Amino acid sequence: MDIMISFVIPVYNEREESVRTVIEEVKRIGERSRKPFEVIVINDGSTDGSNIIIQQFKDIKIINHDYNQGYGASLKTGIQNSQGNWIGIIDADQSYPVEMFLVMIKEIDKFDIIIGSRTGKDIHLSFLRRFAKYILKKIAYILTHQNIPDINSGMQLFKKEIAIRFLKLFPDNFSFTTTLTIAASCNNYKLKFIPINYYKRKGKSHIHPIRDFFAFFRLIIRLTVYFKPLNIFFPISSIFFLIGVTKMIIDAVRFSHFGIGGVALVLMGLQILFLGLLADLIIRRTDL
């Protein structure tokens, strides 16, 4: 199948010069890739001069949201209106190195999704955001058993069919990339993480580290239950079961009989395990 790439750039109240620079650089990368491409810019209800800059480009596809719907909503709009069978996404704040798309494009024949992992030498993230990303990465590994160097990178290149398959799961906010990465990882797609730099963004960030940390945390748990329910239910079941057995042994030694508390904990552990097995069975049958 011939490869066509649709570059999707969401824009919401970004610095005007940053918007212009990113669009121009993406167009140059598309031309240098020597593959058919299109550039889709989603104006997500901007109230500054971003829309004026976007309208100056005559050779790109422009889609306007009447009001601000969110980062994820913008990406979904772009994907649904794209013609390519591969989608490239990038922010319009000049924080990502656009030229790395050329490196990522070289991996198209071997992988299903290529992610720009912000693990390069030049990384501009606040301590709070670095710490939050580290914790989320560890949580994701514990729950999904997948090593994900960058769980919410905003620079990715992926097959359109993957996005269409999981479209109903994508939220309208900043959790789009996290959802895509975990969904692809849990469903045996081939992922490639390419180290990239991450520059100081131009303009004000729309992410709130503390609030969005807990949103990402809830999302990781929800997706793990959705795709890998036993990774959640089995550990919880084991904890209740072991505590219950321990209490039963202590009761047997001290009182020569099993107490109702220990039995209840064991039964609760078994019940949670059966729920996990049922959820896993439903998922596997759905995938058939």
Image: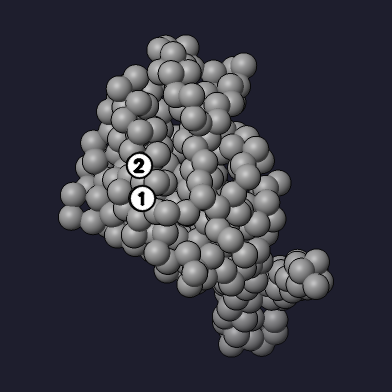
The kind of secondary structure element at disc 1 is: helix
In which quadrant of the rendered view does residue 82 lie? Answer: top right
Q: Amino acid at mark 1?
A: Arg
Residue 215 drawn at (x, y percent):
51, 41
Up/down of 260 relative to 162, above or below: below
Could you tell whether 125 is left or right of 139 in the image? left
Would residue 252 be seen by someone viewing this image from the given angle? yes
Most extreme residue toward the left is 121
Measured in 3D between alpha carbons, the distance from the residue under mark 2 to the one under mark 1, in whole angstroms, is 6 Å
Q: Which residue is mark 1?
A: 32
Up/down of 195 relative to 68, above or below: below
Residue 228 drawn at (x, y percent):
63, 67
Judge by depth and name the residue closer to the eye, 85 or 261: 85
Up/down of 147 relative to 44, above or below: below
Say which residue appears at 42% left-offset and 59% top-offset.
Answer: 105
Say which residue appears at 62% left-offset and 16% top-offset.
Answer: 66
Residue 198 drawn at (x, y percent):
27, 45
Say which residue appears at 30% left-offset and 38% top-offset.
Answer: 95
Could you tell whether 39 is left or right of 194 in the image? right
Judge by depth and name the residue closer to the eye, 50 or 255: 50
Instruction: Give the class, few, some or many, for how many residues have Cα within 10 Å of label 2's Cα (few <14, many ≥20).
Output: few
Q: Quadrant of the N terminus?
A: bottom right
Instruction: Give the class, few, some or many, for how many residues have Cα within 10 Å of label 1's Cα (few <14, many ≥20).
Output: few
In which quadrant of the rendered view does residue 285 lie? Answer: bottom right
Total of numbered circles in the picture? Answer: 2
The kind of secondary structure element at disc 2 is: helix
Would residue 215 be seen by someone viewing this image from the given angle? no
Contact, CB < 8 Å: mark 2 with mark 1? yes
Residue 190 drawn at (x, y percent):
52, 70
Q: Which residue is mark 2?
A: 28
Q: Quadrant of the C terminus?
A: bottom right
Judge by depth and name the residue closer to the eye, 155 or 181: 155
